[in-house]
Image (tube, helix red, strand yellow):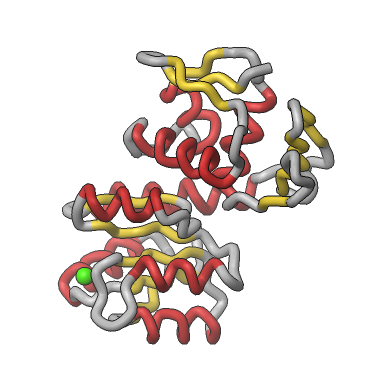
Amino acid sequence: MTGTILLVEDENEIAELLRMYFEKEGFRMIHADTGEAGLERLRERDVRAVLLDIGLPGIDGIEVCRRIRASSEVPVLMLTARDSDVDKVVGLEIGADDYVTKPFSPRELVARVKAVLRRSEERPIRFQVIEVGVFRIDAGRREVAGSDGESVRPTAREFDLLWYLAEHRGLVLSRAQILEAVWGYDYFGETRTVDVHISQLRRKLEGIPIETVWGVGYRFAA
Ligand code: CA
């Protein structure tokens, strides 16, 4: 794989280490050590994915992600230091595609970036609509309309997850099954990733009939 990855990270040691790993895999990496500089690079360059640290001097990674999402669909992977950061990434609906918790293995991070890119490239064009209850899930527009008629556009990953659940409505799907189908078989992440994205969907789409099946996974009610 090739392409330019933007890394926004204030710790130079981590930046150098990641540059080594990503360049070995054929990517180009550009590095910004503040959020402001990162947003600037993103405007100037054709970037395929952003690796974004949360703890930055100046505006933090959460705010940087919000600003990216205001104008771009570029995949964003957050680098978080603590579980409480993960909760922020989830709770604030900032639109990140994935996250890893420090300390992480650079190899794992490379693999996750590749999975995100593969996903975004191989995503088939679908011109289908699934209607369930008051919800209208439009795969062509990648939008969901609810009872109030307002359209919501989830992030790319959230939409893929929603679509997978809706396509298999009525069936109980395990977290592992969901991870494999939506994130790809070579995904290294934990099943918590699924929970995180489900909770984002529930927040964005109030009343969406995704049920938790304790000890197993999830079911989209038919
Ligand atoms: Ca930092």
Q: Position of residue 42 (x, y in %)?
A: 50, 79
In the figure, 134 relative to 4: above or below? above
Q: Residue at x 61, y 26 (%)?
A: 209
Q: Quadrant of residue 30?
A: bottom left
Determine which quarter of the picture holds residue 78.
bottom left
Question: What is the x, y in percent for residue 182?
Answer: 54, 35
Q: Is residue 31 visible?
A: yes
Residue at 28% in and 73% down: 9
- Please name the residue shown 30% across and 59% down the image: 79
Q: Quadrant of the C terminus?
A: top right
Residue nearest the observer in this picture, 68 or 203: 203
Residue 105 is at least partly visible in this image: no
Image location of residue 205, percent across then percent down: 61, 42
Whether residue 191 sits left or right of residue 118 in the image: it is left
User: Is 174 left or right of 24, judged from the image as shown?
Assistant: right
At a point 50% along the width and 57% down the height, the residue shown is 95
From the viewer's perspective, is residue 44 above or below residue 99? below
145 displayed left or right of 78: right
The quarter of the rendering in which ligand 1 is drawn is bottom left
